[in-house]
């Protein structure tokens, strides 16, 4: 397991950059999400051509990669926030100047869904903890009715220096009982399966694995879990956190069956992923899962402060 560094969390007045490394955005929804971030006291800038569109992508690969790299390497920027997911991040991983991005130092990356590929790449190439969470052009942040209140409150507590959030509670425990403290890895199941056989494949040894997905039938979830198992990506996992499975039917029986061979605690039904509310999880930072309370508690901390 590669060591990761925690970025500095945000303070009012910090500059954050919005990027579109995946699918094209709804400009109206993005504008609403931007106003939400500005309402938190952040200076929001745009990086790259956020209006670009090329089929199911937010512009050519070179444009999306340049916008992401520009934002990350900008010394004014404290956080890079992905506007939305969709598809396209895996196409960028070979186009980024990882040496230049490493030299920029740790900062916050926020996103989920397709952004799982960036979380994995940033962990492997930059050694930085990243935030798997809601994005400004998503329904929970950018809809006409305003941001979903619990989502915004949790994001604020997770993002900002001095902020604190309580445990994220699920609905069921599917495995052995117990309490596990370890770094959290994982993300969207489809992306984790797609990264098998690449330099960015997940290695779960000594970690808690987060899994979630959207619009996948149980047999496809079975197939992707089987792929991760056969590729050795889940070897040595200490526990599992199952987030939302929106429009996936009832996948929990097959997930429980495929993970039962690990003999580790599994908690399910946590509002992490594609549902509403949508809570954030620091990947690469320590977390605690407790089957008694069916909860995941984030343990974001700086190495020079209290353990």
Image (tube, rainbow, N blue to C red):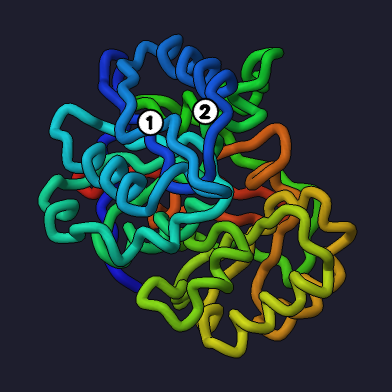
| Looking at the image, residue 219 lies above or below residue 146 | below
Residue at 54% of width from left, 33% of height from top? 25
| Looking at the image, residue 82 lies above or below residue 216 | above
Q: Which of marks 1 and 2 is nearer the N terminus?
A: 1
| Looking at the image, residue 280 lies above or below residue 292 | above
- Say whether residue 155 is left or right of residue 14: right
Which of these two is toward me, 139 or 47? 47
What label does residue 42 carry, if any? none
In this view of the protein, can residue 241 be seen by the observer? Answer: yes
The N terminus is located in which quarter?
bottom left
Which of these two is toward me, 35 or 175? 35
Q: Is disc 2 placed on a helix, strand or loop?
A: loop
| Looking at the image, residue 45 lies above or below residue 24 | above
Residue at 29% of width from left, 20% of height from top? 11
In this figure, which residue is indicated by the disc labeled 2?
136
Residue 44 location, quadrant: top left
> Seen from this angle, which residue lies furthest front?
54
Which of these two is toward me, 11 or 207? 11
Which of these two is toward me, 64 or 296? 64
Q: Is disc 1 placed on a helix, strand or loop?
A: strand
* Location of residue 302 in the rendering, given as x and y in whole percent from the top left corner: 27, 44
Check contact, mark 1 vs mark 2: CB within 8 A.
yes
Label 2 environment density (alpha carbons within 10 Å; few <14, some 14–19, many ≥20) = many
In this figure, which residue is indicated by the disc labeled 1?
18
- Say whether residue 256 is left or right of residue 85: right
Query: Disc 1 versus disc 2: distance between alpha carbons?
Result: 9 Å
Number of labels in the image equals: 2
* Location of residue 130 in the rendering, given as x and y in whole percent from the top left corner: 38, 48
Label 1 environment density (alpha carbons within 10 Å; few <14, some 14–19, many ≥20) = many
In this view of the protein, can residue 305 be seen by the observer? Answer: no
Residue at 47% of width from left, 68% of height from top? 207
* Location of residue 300 in the rendering, given as x and y in whole percent from the top left corner: 39, 44
């Amino acid at each position: 397991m590669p060591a990761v560094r925690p970025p500095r969390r945000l303070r009012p007045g910090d500059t954050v950059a919005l990027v579109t490394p995946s699918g094209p955005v709804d400009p109206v929804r993005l504008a609403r999400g931007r106003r939400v971030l500005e309402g938190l006291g952040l200076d929001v800038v745009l990086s790259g051509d956020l209006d670009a569109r090329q089929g199911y992508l937010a512009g050519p690969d070179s444009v999306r990669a340049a916008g992401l790299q520009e934002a990350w390497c900008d010394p004014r920027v404290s956080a890079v926030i992905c506007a939305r997911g969709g598809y396209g991040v895996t196409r960028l991983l070979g186009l980024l100047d990882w040496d230049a991005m490493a030299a920029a130092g740790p900062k916050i990356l926020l996103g989920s869904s397709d952004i799982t590929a960036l979380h994995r790449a940033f962990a492997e190439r930059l050694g930085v903890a990243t935030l798997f969470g809601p994005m400004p052009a998503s329904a929970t942040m950018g809809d006409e009715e305003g941001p979903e209140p619990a989502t915004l409150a949790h994001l604020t507590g997770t993002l900002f220096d001095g902020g604190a959030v309580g445990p994220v509670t699920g609905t069921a425990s599917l495995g052995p009982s117990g309490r596990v403290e370890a770094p959290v890895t994982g993300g969207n199941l489809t992306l984790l399966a797609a990264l098998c056989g690449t330099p960015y494949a997940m290695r779960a040894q000594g970690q808690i694995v987060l899994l979630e997905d959207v619009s996948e039938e149980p047999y496809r979830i079975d197939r992707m879990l089987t792929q991760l198992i056969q590729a050795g990506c889940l070897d040595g996992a200490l526990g599992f956190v199952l987030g939302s499975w929106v429009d996936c039917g009832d996948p929990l029986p097959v997930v429980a069956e495929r993970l039962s061979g690990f003999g580790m605690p599994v908690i399910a039904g946590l509002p992490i992923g594609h549902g509403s509310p949508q809570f954030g999880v620091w990947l690469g930072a320590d977390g605690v899962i407790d089957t008694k309370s069916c909860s995941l508690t984030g343990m974001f901390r700086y190495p020079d402060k209290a353990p």
